[in-house]
Image (spheres, rainbow, N blue to C red):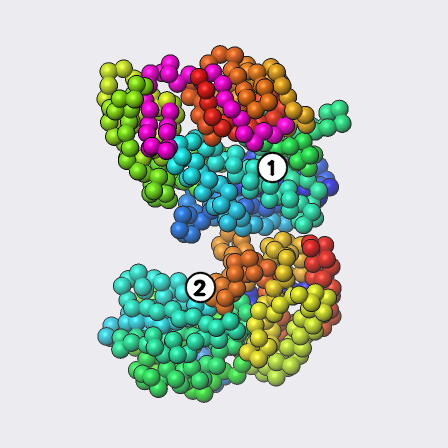
Amino acid sequence: MIYLDHAATTPMRPGIWEAMRPYSTEVFGNSSGVHDVSRRAKNALEEARERIASIIGSEPAEIVFTSGGTESDNLALKGAALSGTRRRGVVTVATEHEAVLETTDFLHRLGLPTEVVGVDRSGAVDLDSLLEAIRPDTAVVSVMWVNNETGSVQDLPRIAAAVRERDHEVLVHTDAVQAFSSQDVDVDALGVDLLTLTGHKFGGPKGAGLLYVRDGTPLEPLLHGGGQELGRRSGTHDVAGAVGLAAAMEAAAADRPRFRTEVGSIRDQFEKRVTAGMPEAVVNTPETMRSPHHLSLRLPGIRNQTLLMRLDRAGVAASAGSACQSGAAQVSHVLEAMGLGVDQARESVRFSFGWDSSFDQAIDAAEIVLGLVEELR
Amino acid sequence: MRALVAMSGGVDSSVAAALMRDAGHEVVGVTLKLWSGPHGEAPTAGCCTVSDAEDARRVAAQLDIPYYVLDYTDEFRGGVVDRFVSDYASGRTPNPCIECNRTVKFDRLLNGLDDFDCEVLVTGHHARNRLEDGGWALRRGQDRAKDQSYVLSMLTRSELARIRLPVGEMTKTEVRVVAAGIGLRTAEKPESMDICFVGQGDYRGFLRDTAPEAFQPGPLVDGDGEEIGQHVGIAGFTVGQRRGLGVAVGEPRYVVRIEPSTSTVVLGRRDELSVAGVGLDQLTWTAGTPVTGRVMAQYRAHGEPVPATLHRDRLLFAEPQLAVAPGQTVAFYDDDRVLGGALIADTYR
């Protein structure tokens, strides 16, 4: 199999599983317990928290372990909007992940002031509209750093600074799930108050994520209970998951220079070959603002669900960008927001490369894609 | 052979996939996502729900065949739902399941076979499709009580050549036995009866939500044209309807005619429902050649066939028939063989 769906999830990097294993077996304790096996678990958990904090430039206490990106996005938005201050509103962008858009819609249905602003054809958020949407009761502005479907990279430091300049009390949240593999993450340099990460997008475990919460940020928990995570996220800790998350973050952060150049040129090689063989193919994101491992490609005249079926049979795993629970390829709201028509969105396929991708795979996959395009036209 | 199996999540299509696989064919399972509610929300009922796709997916996993959900929601909305609504709004009695077969399921999947790199399309319909004297012949299913050949009567002979209906050779009981024998999780699953996109069997509520313009008040008149009441919209009525007319008169009254141009619903006695013949539209010759003369005609999915005579686009019943309405499909049979089918364009007395 040639796996080109790393934006959906990735295989674990070497050593991660082994690092996690003891915390589901010998060191199985509940990290809140009062005996040795629990203390050892608690110790591993806090060590993981410290390692993570040092990677993203935060304090350990600013890390809230969650079950992943969706929970972190929910916690950031609901937690900020429902924290009991006079600031209850959410401003976000049309190309966000469903975890942000659906949460925003939920808050809207609760009667909270919400605003979703558009993007231009390149996928860049319209900064003026974003700033204009901020009201005196806006609690949080949420802007995804790297888009999961197109790989569009927003100028997050500039956006965060502009939001802060407009209203220094507004919180800035970013879903950085797709960014971590390629972007240096430093919460102060970015100027964000809330930041979402999840382990499985960069070679870590599924079900293990975090929300960075800047010290002093008012936040209502989603999960009330035993008061774990300083009351911000109750529930018995997934110590193995936290350890795996920390190990994967270390490995991915250390691998970034290689990732940016090598994985980037593997992606470029694939793109070059496909577009050379099919000159009418269109890359949906401009090169200047694209992450190194995403490729949203429109193949005119080819319906994506058919191509994906054929690719699967040929041993190439790719996707249409997002899928509903039934698994049907849906028309991408991201591409629609960028101005593509429904038919154009249906001709678009997402190829996403990862830490384990190789040049040979890119070359083989490009040949397979071109062969199928020839057949399907 | 590479076979594309349309899997609904029900027992028939599950067994169809299993039989094809066990016969040594390379099988690919697909479920069509057709509907996500009038306003795009999650589906609630019928053959296109997430839970049915989940059943089909699990069956496919059990059979170890690749499985995909294909999105045809736009085609379904345009070809089936909008048509269903506009048919009711114009006083016709549509059969959306036949329309779906014709314009979405068979049309899209047969046209897509090459693209999917498959040679035949397999469904779980109870009808027999056999090679006879050098051509494909569609016949009633082995299980006469479950026969679905009526809804397939709009298929052409060249389409039949690329369709396989393995469960049509079995009774429903045998299908369930096969399903249980290979441990299929859908073996005991009850059959779905509702119109899939309507849910809970309430198609009038659906019409009211989807096409409020089809609910213009108008007169209820008797056969002499005398007004005997008012109604809230012709979309709430079908020819032959007796209940819920909103008028109380001595003897039973039925809807005998709907006149959309004046939003008039004409009521009458049972014998006024009788129809001597019908005009036909969209004639399809399933058996390959146009048929004239004596046929057996069936105009309801679970109705009995009646003797009739075909003259080009006219069908004359040997005995007058009750409750035949424009928009219905009529299938023509010679014994158990489907000769063709058509839509009823109009009726005459």
Label 1 – label 2 distance at C-alpha: 35 Å
> Is residue B171 visible from the viewing direction of this image?
no
- Classified by dominant secondary structure, the portion drawn in magenta counts as strand
Instruction: Give the structural element (helix, strand or loop) at label 2.
Output: helix
The dot on residue B123 is 1
For the image shown, how many numbered marks are present on the structure? Answer: 2
Q: Amino acid at mark 1?
A: Thr
Q: Chain of mark 1?
A: B
Label 2 environment density (alpha carbons within 10 Å; few <14, some 14–19, many ≥20)? some
Q: Position of residue A10 (x, y in %)?
A: 58, 68
Q: Position of residue B212 (x, y in %)?
A: 33, 43
The residue drawn where x is 63% and y is 28% is B285
Report which residue position mark 2 lands on.
A98
Q: Quadrant of residue B134?
A: top right
Front one among B310 and B163: B310
> Is residue A321 visible from the viewing direction of this image?
yes
Start and end of the magenta stretch? B257-285
